[in-house]
Image: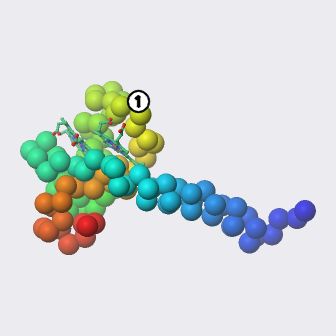
Amino acid sequence: MKFRRADILFILLIPVVVLCLWLLTTEQTTLRIPVDETHAEALQAYRDDGKKAAEQVCRTCHSQDTTPLSKTHPPEFRCMFCHKPASSLSSSAGTAAP
Ligand code: HEC
Ligand code: HEC
């Protein structure tokens, strides 16, 4: 069977859909980022420059070398896809998720 461009795109789409569904289901139980002194810098980076900038800050503390995440922690590619700021932030940041 010969693969056409559309077939390949469809095959590539499957893992993306699965990943999205998985992210949606994990979000319910996921811990929120505490709004405290410790997280002030990361949350400020989020407000100013968005998720990717904030995640650089997360790594300075939560990394394999300093404070590893638990063994049961899911793949940690993008912290803020799963961990939303604790609710008190969302009123002050226009872009924050509910
Ligand atoms: C300055 C170091 C530091 C930075 C930067 C940092 N954290 Fe933390 N984080 C901690 C410490 C220490 C704790 C445990 C004590 C606490 O709750 O403050 C913690 C706890 C947590 C918890 C668990 C909260 C709970 O309820 O148990 C989550 C989730 C978390 N951090 C996510 C993040 C994410 C996501 C980022 C980046 C946006 C981030 N942290 C940036 C130090 C940091
Ligand atoms: C795919 C979703 C997802 C991503 C991405 C993610 N987390 Fe988590 N995180 C979770 C879940 C779910 C838990 C609860 C884990 C458990 O019960 O073992 C958790 C727990 C934590 C905890 C509590 C302590 C622990 O290890 O269980 C911290 C701290 C934390 N995450 C920080 C981060 C940081 C920092 C990043 C980015 C480097 C990140 N997470 C990326 C879903 C995620």
Return the x and y of residue 69 as percentages of the image width and height: 34, 33
74 sits left or right of 4 in the view: left
Single out the residue that lies furthest toward the left.
Answer: 37
68 sits left or right of 19 in the view: left
Reply above or below: 61 against 52: above
Task: Judge whether residue 45 can be spotted in this image.
Answer: no
The one of 55 and 14 positioned closer to us in this rendering: 14
Single out the residue that lies furthest toward the right.
Answer: 1
- Residue at image position (69%, 67%) is 10
Residue for badge 1 = 71
- Residue at image position (28%, 61%) is 50
Return the x and y of residue 29 as percentages of the image width and height: 34, 50
89 sits left or right of 74 in the view: left
- Residue at image position (70%, 61%) is 11
Three-letter code for the amino acid on which mark 1 is drawn: Lys
The quarter in which the C terminus is drawn is bottom left
Reply above or below: 10 against 55: below
Element at label 1? loop
The one of 29 and 63 positioned closer to us in this rendering: 29
Return the x and y of residue 68 as percentages of the image width and height: 33, 30
* CB of mark 1 near ligand 2 (< 8 Å): yes
- Residue at image position (90%, 62%) is 1
Return the x and y of residue 6 as percentages of the image width and height: 74, 72
